[in-house]
Amino acid sequence: LDDALRATPSANRPLRARLTLNAPADTAASLCACWSDAAAPCSRSRNRCVSAAAGASNTLDLPMRMVCGQDDEGTLEVEVVPASAVTPCGEWSVTWSIAE
């Protein structure tokens, strides 16, 4: 982390993940994600979910919580599942970006 950002925490913006779920043409899908650190799952953000209807897409924007005095690092945990337990999991895709 740049020392200038460490000295001026107000300039230190959270890391943000942007995940776009593209559901299969014949079934809806859901995507859940959270930021974790080595000590605990979902410790750097809440677990959040979005759903996409069959053949549609939906986007989740997820900021990572920063902790003053610590390095800004985390693991993005992602899970994609069928929107309901009775539908099969089809061909879905996820595009993503991470930025400050």
Image: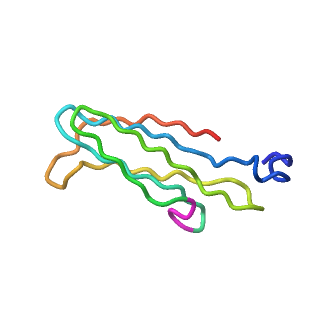
Quadrant housing residue 25? top left
Is 8 contained in the magenta span? no
Magenta highlight: main SS: loop
Q: Residue furthest bottom?
A: 39
Q: Residue furthest left?
A: 86
Q: Position of residue 70 (x, y in %)?
A: 74, 60
Q: Quadrant of the C terminus?
A: top right
Across and down, in percent, residue 44 comes to: 57, 60
Q: Is residue 54 left or right of residue 35?
A: left
> 79 or 19, which lies in front?
19
Residue shown at the point (39%, 52%) measured from the top left: 32
Looking at the picture, tell me which residue is in the foreground, 38 or 55: 55
- Residue name at image x 59 percent, y 61 percent: 37
Q: Position of residue 99 (x, y in %)?
A: 61, 39
Residue 68 horizontal side relative to residue 25, left or right: right
> In the displayed structure, would residue 65 be above or below residue 27?
below
Please provide percent x and percent y for residue 12. Answer: 73, 48
Is residue 91 or residue 84 the one in the foreground? Answer: 84
What span is in magenta?
Answer: 40-44
